[in-house]
Each structure stands twice: as structure tokens, then as C-alpha cells.
Amino acid sequence: MKLPWRSRVETASPEVIPPEPPGPVIDIHSSPGLEEALRGVPEDGSCKVLDLGPSVADNVEFVSSFASYLQIVDVIDRDPSASDLEGGGFGRLSALQPLCGQHRRSFSLVLMWDVLNYLSIDQAERVLQSVAELCLPNARLHAIVFATDTMAAIPNRYRIIDSARLAYEPATSELRGAPNLVPAAVQKLLQGFRVEHSFVLQHGVHEYVATRKRWYVKK
């Protein structure tokens, strides 16, 4: 007697879910520039700090350990949809203007982070005019300049680990071209300041420490 075929149960193929693209990698690097800039701040508790990046809780806590006042003014527009990535349209140039009355010649330390990399020459000059007016003579300024062909499409967030180390926290893994400013161009942009120290780091950045000139004539 012929047995019937067993019925076949059709099973659907498992859905293949593509892996998510890797997110931005957070790196921790030594920061001789930050360490040098901090050496020049007043030790009598009178130090006032101007931070030109976004508010970062660890940075606020660190700066509060030695400064009497911290002013955070993010001069970069970090919304890529609102920024002209090719034209250097990251600048929020009006952000510093309200400070120039009350806080003129007040600050002893400026944390500029990577701001110079994301501004056009005109924008950088205008921002630094305001910064120079806000600083005391001999105030210190710390800046990070990329010495690579590419950089993050949106400015990094920098978190202070300690006085000699920084965490680089990218907002995106996308890249754009870097201006690769040479030292002479950086010194020209830092009007009102004199570059005292320059550090070339292995991960492709230059750190600059500049001192506010005693005499500065606004252009």
C-alpha cells in the first residue's frame, strides 16, 4: 500500500537586518597645550574663564575648581541642516556681542577648542576681535587646529579628563575637508594675541597657546 507524502510546511526565510553603521569613536589624547594654558591662570581665585564650546558637565566641574567665574558661549552652529558646510557658515557671530559691555577685559583664560577650523577667515577675525576685547592683558588662549586633510563634518565636543588630557567626542562619523591652517595663518587670525607655544601631536592636530597682548588696537 502506497503511503501518502508528508505535508511540507513552508517556513519563511529569516529577515536579514543589516548591521548599524559604527558610531563615532571617542578618543582620549594628551593635551600639552591645555596643560600649558592652565599654568598661566591666576592662582588667587580671581580667574575668569571664557569657554567657546558647548556646555560639558565635566568641564564645568573642572574649571570651577580654580576659577571664580565661567562663561560658556558656543560660537558654533552645530546643526548641520542650518549650516553652510562648504562656505564656513558655522559661526554664530552675534553670540559674544552681549558680553562686551559688562565683561570687557575680564577673562584670564579662553578655551577656544576647534572653533578656528569651522569658521571662514572673516568669521574668525570677527570672533577674535570680540575675544580680544573680553580678555585681560596676558590672558591665555588655547586652540586646537587640525593638521589633516579631513575633519569631522560637525565640530567635536571636548571633555576635560584632567589638566593634561582631553576626550575628543565626535558628533558624527561623517567627514569634510579641513582648512589645514599653517602656523603663520593661525598667528594672523589670533589678532590681539601672541602665540607663545605650539604643540604638534601625533593624532594630527596642532595645539596653540597664545597670550593676550598688552596693547591691542581693534581693526
Image: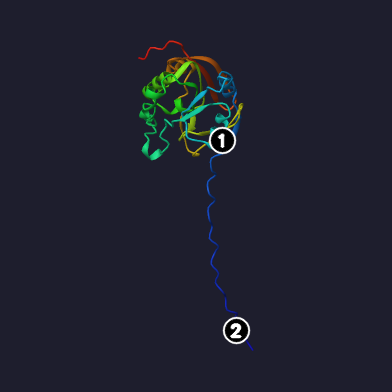
The part of the image, by quadrant, that contains residue 130 is top left
Is label 1 or label 2 in front? 1
Q: Label 1: which residue?
A: 58
Give 105 or 73, whichever is nearer the viewer: 105
Q: Residue 77 at what x, y percent from top left? A: 40, 34
Q: Is residue 203 left or right of residue 101?
A: right
Q: Residue 123 at what x, y percent from top left? A: 37, 25
Picture quarter with the C terminus:
top left
Q: Secondary structure at mark 2?
A: loop
Give 26 or 131, whichever is nearer the viewer: 131
Q: Earlier in the sequence, mark 1 or mark 2?
A: 2
Instruction: Look at the image and tell me whether residue 144 can be seen.
Output: no
Q: Label 2: which residue?
A: 4
Q: Is residue 168 left or right of residue 77?
A: right
Instruction: Look at the image and tell me whether residue 103 can be seen.
Output: yes
Residue ID at (54%, 37%): 57
Q: Secondary structure at mark 1?
A: helix
Q: Residue 119 at what x, y percent from top left? A: 41, 27
Q: Residue 156 at what x, y percent from top left? A: 50, 34
Give 124 or 107, whichever is nearer the viewer: 107
Instruction: Count up the numbered dots.
Output: 2
Residue ID at (48%, 38%): 174
Image: 82 above or below 7: above
